[in-house]
Image (cartoon, rainbow, N blue to C red):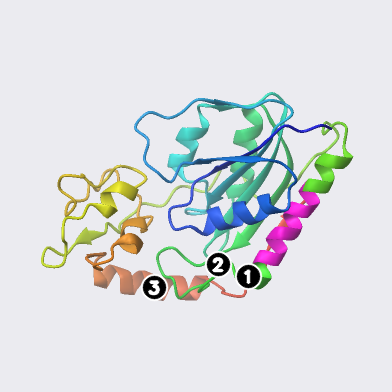
Amino acid sequence: MKMNELKLVYFSPTGATRKAVMETARSIDLKSVSFDFSVYKEKKPTLKFTRNDLAIFGIPVYYGRVPALFMEYLQNISGDNTPAALVATYGCREYEDALLELKTEVESRGFKVIGAAAFPAEHSIVPSIGSRRPNKTDLKAIAEFGVELNRRIRKEESFDHIDIKVPGNTPYKKYGKNSLFPKAESSMCTLCGACAKVCPTGAIPLKEPKKTDTKKCIGCMKCVRVCKQNARSVNSLKMKMLEGKLKKACQSDKKAEIFL
């Protein structure tokens, strides 16, 4: 089938998902355009893709699910039997229902899933878990996923016969409740506003960057990572408890899982 353009649609507060999506795209012989939903948009954009586009949807896994914020953006995205690939990154625990939920959602909006993959990544809250992943081995697996997608779109005249099966259960696992709200240490914060500019939910007021709206914060830790003064952090006791819990539940030697 003759393809027009590669559409990259992703949510990647700490960068791992973007890295996986971009590495996948490098192996596909199409001009690409990116839609990064990691940057706060008060008005959700409306996107319509054609049947000759290839879409890649990329998400980090939150609580074994697709991030609720990304689901909001998907409400304004539609395809016309548009082929799509799914990329999920997860912090070396489990991705549970995330791929199934993402597949179900994008197919309900006019897309045809022709490939999916789940890749282990450095944990967004406890970076020592899966440290520096995706690593060279991971990137090789991600690139091979892109190669296989490229072969598929070049070989197939129609994708109607493709039926990708991914793990997951319904009803989906319930979303966990975020209890980690990064706050700024007054003596260290310089009011530069870097955290407010990158917050994907608009939880940090640009004029008052020391504050955090806990009703909007999703605990993605993007503000913590971009603060050059190391002024932003979460409650140390809560972090210590969570770190102990996650280190028991996560395995840093998780492997990529690809479905074609």
Which residue in the rendered view is the most extreme toward the left? Answer: 187
Residue picked out by circle 1: 254
Residue 37: in magenta span? no
**Residue 106 in picture, x, y percent from top left:** 62, 34
Residue 217 visible, this orientation: no
The residue wearing badge 2 is 92
The residues tagged by marks 1 and 3 sit, at their Cα atoms, a distance apart of: 18 Å
Q: Nearer the viewer, residue 112 or 134?
A: 134
Which residue reaches farthest front?
31
Identify residue type, mark 2: Cys
The quadrant holding residue 242 is bottom left
Decide which of tag 2 and tag 1 comes sooner along the chain.
2
Please rate how many residues cluster around mark 1, counting C-alpha atoms within 10 Å: few if below 14, some from 14 to 19, many from 20: some
> In the rendered image, which quarter contains the N terminus?
top right
Q: Amino acid at mark 1?
A: Lys
Q: Earlier in the sequence, mark 1 or mark 3?
A: 3
The residue stretch that appears in magenta:
139-149
Could you tell me how far apart the alpha carbons at marks 2 and 1 are, in whole angstroms?
A: 6 Å
- Quadrant housing residue 102: top right
Mark 3 neighbour density, 10 Å: few (under 14) some (14–19) many (20 or more): some
x and y percent of residue 3 in the render?
A: 76, 33
Q: Secondary structure at mark 1?
A: loop
Left or right position of 177 against 10: left
- Classify residue 205 by image quadrant: top left
Which residue is labeled 3 in the image? 243
Q: Is residue 117 above or below residue 91?
A: above
Q: Are marks 3 and 2 in contact (CB under 8 Å)?
A: no
Residue drawn at 27 percent across, 45 percent down:
203
